[in-house]
Amino acid sequence: MSELFNLNGKTALVTGSSRGLGFAFAQALAEHGADVILNGTNRQRLEQAVRHISDRGFRADALAFDVADEQAVAAAFDTLDQQNKTVDILINNAGIQLRKPLTELSAHEWHRVVDTNLTSAFLVGREAAKRMIVRGKGGKIINIGSLTSECARATVAPYTVSKGGVKMLTRAMTAEWATHNIQINAIGPGYMATDMNEALLNNPQFDGWVKSRTPAGRWGLPQELAGTAVFLASKASDYVNGQIIYVDGGMLAVL
């Protein structure tokens, strides 16, 4: 393994990692040597994900907490402190989707999506960065954006706003934390074949639109984000900061 991408001796926390993209991120970091901490709120599913990684000979633990709850986030990091576990790499992946026209959207629904997708990245990122700064050894924070960090679609307004915010949060974090040798970047996945998108995958009209709109002619696979995540988590990206890298089969490159 190239030393540029070697994550031995590093501990990575991946939020929302019991399945989907988060699980793919956690598995990729583990395969490159990191000790991974998986997060979610469904303890049974979380433990199954940890076992899947551990059974392959990699180091994985579970930490169940609600990333949108400020007190729960603080308590989770206090637990890590008590266990002498330091988060060297953080992937803010936790997110939800809600499809509804703006005129029918309640304030509660709006806040639920924005808090889960955007505010959580601030809350978890803040706790991780505080500790990275005190340790003085730098760190990596990777926020998960979306194609909607750049463009909008009807009926997903709170998701679009939250992912646009993730792009700008990444830049705001960079403005304050880069001087402490912390690299903060984002990944913008295209249309990926995940549980969250199952209804869209099974919709012939939408499936056809994705395939015709994407130059690659297909949906992406979660594991196809792994290389970008490992790059941004490793020494190879030590002078990359405040960027969002789109892994989208070329969708944003064409009209």
Image (cartoon, rainbow, N blue to C red):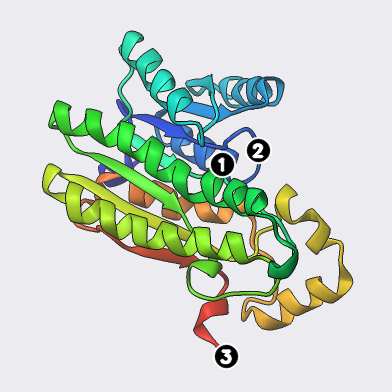
Closer-to-camera residue (44/70)? 70
Can residue 101 be seen at all in this image of the molecule?
no
Residue 19, disc: 2
Per the image, the residue denoted by label 3 is: 255
How far separated are the C-alphas under marks 2 and 1? 6 Å
The one nearer the camera, 181 or 78, is 78
Marks 3/1: CA–CA distance: 30 Å
Residue 20: image quadrant is top right
Which residue occupies 59% across, 60% down? 158
Using residue 125 as the reference point, say whether residue 19 is left or right of it.
Answer: right
Give the residue displayed 39% in from the left and 32% down from the top. Answer: 12
Q: Position of residue 196 (x, y in %)?
A: 71, 51
User: Quick one: quadrant of the N terminus?
Assistant: top left
User: At which x and y percent is residue 84?
Assistant: 30, 12
| Residue that mark 1 sits on | 22
Name the amino acid, label 2. Arg
Asked which quadrant contains residue 64, the reply is top right
Please state which amino acid type lies under the numbered disc 1: Gly
Residue 191 is situated, as x and y percent measured from the top left of the image, at 65, 65
Q: Is residue 170 above or below residue 70?
A: below
Disc 2 to disc 3: CB gap under 8 Å: no
